Amino acid sequence: MDPADVPPHPPPAPATPPADPTRGFLGVFRYSGRALQLVWTTSRSLTIALALLTLAAGLLPAGVAFVGARIVDAVVDANRQWLAGTHPSLAPVFAWVALEGLLVAALAGAQRGLSTCQSLLRAQLGQRVNVMILEKALTLQLAHFEDSEFYDKLTRARREASSRPLSLVTRTFGLGQNVISLVSYSTLLYQFSPWAVAVLVLAGLPSFLAETKFSGDAFRLFRWRSPETRMQLYLETVLAREDHAKEVKLFGLGPLLLQRYRDIFHTLYSADRDLTIRRDGWGFGLGLLGTLALYGAYAWIAASTVVSRITLGQMTMYLMLFRQGQSAVSAMLSAIGGMYEDNLYLSTLYEYLETSVPPSQGKARRGAQPEDGIRFEHVSFTYPGAGEPALHDINLHIRPGESLALVGQNGSGKTTLIKLLTRLYAPDHGCILLDGTDLREWDEAALLQRIGVIFQDFARYQMRVGENVGAGDVSHFEDAARWREASDKGMASDFIDSLPAGFETQLGKWFRDGRELSGGQWQKIALARAFMRSQADILVLDEPTAAMDAAAEATIFEHFRELAGGRIAILISHRFSTVRMADQIIVIQDGRIIERGNHAQLMAGNGHYAHLFSLQAQGYR
């Protein structure tokens, strides 16, 4: 890694995070129904069990309080009989105690069942949401993955949204449970006084309003800092991955990047600290109002007992009802605030899942003129957000059986041309034809089966050797015979056979017994991968042999040319000893074709190609 490629120092945080895109407190609850449907379709049986257990957990506490009052009154009656000299009957006391024990056991079972259902749903739902995120990624275009704002969206979805649907549903059921409990408590409290019910409900509102306000602030902070969070993850990767370790050590980048990691943390922590202090400070202050209401009600109920308006057992019940009722109100309001917060975070998941992707309209599986090959007609293309076009007015014709070499400086547009040919991008102007049919009219799967391509930044999968080769054709991913055939064509069989387990050898250092390959060996694996597609009649090599010496590259390209047969072969290389083998050579500069012809014609023209060839040839003299 070049020091110039080190990510820039994070900019200072703005004074206040930007406003979130949600539509107000009520509007943001639009995701609740979708979350419930998601949980329902994930596991109907667990969802039904969760609902029934929630109902039971909501009703049982009031039953326990009611039976508790009967126990106290039965004990008082028995004690009065004892003091009056009458032998008391303890059967009612024991009966009520036994009933309360059963209710408490049932309540404990319901709560344990809720915990079990939630744990099982959490595992299933987390997996399902992560699969949804990855399935969406498979439908996205290359432009999405080269857009920093998209990565912020993906980071937000993966970090929080995968756990939020279950949280939302759990809180929804919890809200239902507490509503049921509150209704049962209020029914009993109403016998004491309707005003007691009003005090019970209203005392928790201030804390609820404060919690909701700070939930919105926390979400806006979450959205605002997504780029910094992603930079932290990237720095962790650079500091702790084997593919960066050599340069980090040799260039002494470790302390610099670690300090940058610390700086980002302190920027994020300061915002978190301020929000936490404000949130807890207001929560404590407003929570005191609920405490005052609770003890005011205690005094009221105690005074009513003293004047014999209610019995001792009723006093015990009402005190328990008020305390538990206040807890239920607080839990309800907290659940509503939490649901609001969950909806905010779920907006990031659905914002990602609803990323618009232009539908593929192509249906053609073969072209109108199979003998015509590939044509670029006045093709121009500019990368999203770029000021200058990467390609400008490209006209090009490659017939079946011909080989084409692309020559030009780095950044001249050679790889961009291949991206357009493989439909990773669509041209802004002009059209690209394959067998006389516009690429936009081709069925995408049929088109890609026609092309075998290896880019200079090919993937090095931390998998078995055979799977690295088989990745070139997923329909034969596990086909050992095809692995062998492709590796023979890619000139990789000799070194593969020398590995401990041949095609079964684990590659890379991420997993146990993994073997690391040299750059040249990895490139032969990539070449073999290109030959996995036996139906491909367009073969593209975009500098995949850069790690090999000139002689090895020339041997491979000669071998490649022989195997190409009647196929179209497109080569990108900076070595002119290899390029000269091509039937047609295109020289690209600043996105434009400035020269074309075969080697002899370009040398005779004494232009840019001849100048570069002569410069490189001097290095071998």
Image (cartoon, rainbow, N blue to C red):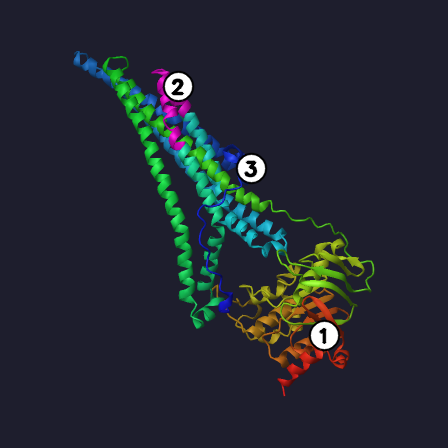
Main SS of residues in magenta: helix
Please name the residue that numbered disc 3 is placed on: 34
Q: Sequence-wise, which precedes: disc 1 or disc 3?
A: 3
Q: Position of residue 277 (x, y in %)?
A: 35, 42
Callout 1 crowding tier (Cα within 10 Å): few <14, some 14–19, many ≥20: many
Residue at the image point whose x is 72% and y is 74% from the top: 561
Please name the residue that numbered disc 2 is placed on: 187
Specify start and end residues of the magenta stretch as a single range.
Answer: 182-208
At numbered mark 3, what does the secondary structure look like: helix, strand or loop? helix
Residue at the image point whose x is 58% and y is 68% from the top: 503
Residue lying at the far bottom of the rendered structure: 621
Residue at the image point whose x is 73% and y is 57% from the top: 429
Residue 113 appears in the figure: no
Foreground: 501 or 496? 496
Say above or below: 223 vs 89.
Answer: below
Tag shown at residue 561: 1
Quadrant of the frame with the C terminus:
bottom right
Callout 2 crowding tier (Cα within 10 Å): few <14, some 14–19, many ≥20: some
Q: Sequence-wise, which precedes: disc 1 or disc 2?
A: 2
Q: Amino acid at mark 3?
A: Arg
Q: Amino acid at mark 2?
A: Thr
Cα gap from disc 1 to disc 2, whole angstroms: 87 Å
Q: Position of residue 1 (x, y in %)?
A: 50, 68
Q: Position of residue 117 (x, y in %)?
A: 45, 38
Q: Is residue 212 magenta?
A: no
Cα gap from disc 1 to disc 3, whole angstroms: 55 Å
Q: Amino acid at mark 1?
A: Arg
Q: Sequence-wise, which precedes: disc 2 or disc 3?
A: 3
At numbered mark 1, what does the secondary structure look like: helix, strand or loop? helix
Q: Position of residue 309 (x, y in %)?
A: 27, 12
